[in-house]
Image (spheres, rainbow, N blue to C red):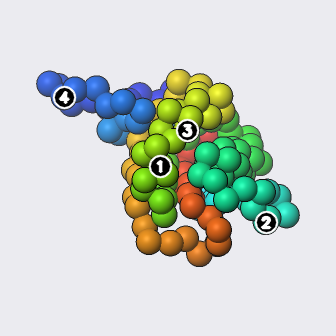
């Protein structure tokens, strides 16, 4: 199975995401928003970077139950309640991304919100994957 990043002619390549992804047939897996808590639903940190890392690990853990791997993710939406912290941590978050996702960049959206349901959550990630 393959995924193809979609880049309209004449567009500058996006950095850290794809404008769109075309996926070959497979099993579609929808992953609910995952926050940065552990398996017992406890936050181990109030800082953005460790929460992002745990949330991404949680997404990948749910995906693995369906037989999926990071490269099967076609779409991801991030909801963040602390824009200044996100902007300040972009380099560290990129390092976490590369560690867990490699160089795979799905179609992504970043949405800043006033708060998340689960306190003291600062970021929530949801994803859609196509698993062969």
Question: Could you give the CA–CA distance between mark 4 and mark 2, rounded to whole angstroms?
Answer: 42 Å
Identify the residue position indicated by label 4 in the image: 11
| Labels 4 & 3 near each other (Cβ < 8 A) | no
Question: Could you give the CA–CA distance between mark 3 and mark 2, rounded to whole angstroms?
Answer: 22 Å
Left or right: where 1 falls relative to 64: left
| Labels 1 & 3 near each other (Cβ < 8 A) | yes
Question: Could you give the CA–CA distance between mark 1 and mark 2, rounded to whole angstroms?
Answer: 22 Å
Identify the residue position indicated by label 1 in the image: 86
Question: Could you give the CA–CA distance between mark 1 and mark 3, rounded to whole angstroms?
Answer: 8 Å
Say which quadrant the C terminus sits in.
top right
The disc at residue 12 is none
Say which quadrant the N terminus sits in.
top right
Dot 2: within a 10 Å radius of its alpha carbon, few (fewer than 14), some, or many (20 or more) residues? Answer: few
Identify the residue position indicated by label 2 in the image: 41
Tag 3, which secondary structure? helix
Tell me what residue is drawn at x 56 percent, y 58 percent.
123
Q: Nearer the viewer, mark 4 or mark 2?
A: 2
Position in image of residue 36 (x %, y %): 68, 56
Left or right: where 65 falls relative to 91: right
Q: How many marks?
A: 4
| Labels 4 & 2 near each other (Cβ < 8 A) | no
Dot 1: within a 10 Å radius of its alpha carbon, few (fewer than 14), some, or many (20 or more) residues? Answer: some
Q: Report whether residue 59 is seen.
A: no
Q: Nearer the viewer, mark 4 or mark 3?
A: 3
Tag 4, which secondary structure? loop
Frontmost residue, 130 versus 124: 124
Position in image of residue 108 (x %, y %): 42, 45
Position in image of residue 26 (x %, y %): 57, 41
Dot 4: within a 10 Å radius of its alpha carbon, few (fewer than 14), some, or many (20 or more) residues? Answer: few
Instruction: Decide which of tag 3 and tag 2 comes sooner along the chain.
Output: 2
Question: Could you give the CA–CA distance between mark 4 and mark 3, rounded to whole angstroms?
Answer: 25 Å
């Amino acid at each position: 199975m393959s995924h193809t990043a979609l880049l309209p002619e004449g567009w500058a390549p996006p950095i850290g995401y794809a404008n769109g992804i075309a996926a070959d047939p497979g099993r579609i897996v929808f992953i609910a928003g995952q926050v940065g808590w552990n398996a017992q639903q406890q936050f181990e940190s109030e800082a953005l970077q460790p929460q992002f890392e745990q949330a991404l690990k949680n997404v990948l853990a749910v995906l693995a139950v369906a037989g999926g791997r990071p490269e099967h993710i076609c779409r991801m939406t991030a909801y963040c309640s602390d824009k200044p912290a996100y902007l300040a941590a972009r380099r560290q978050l990129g390092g976490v991304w590369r560690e867990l996702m490699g160089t795979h960049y799905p179609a992504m959206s970043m949405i800043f919100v006033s708060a998340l349901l689960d306190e003291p959550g600062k970021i929530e990630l949801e994803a859609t994957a196509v698993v062969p």
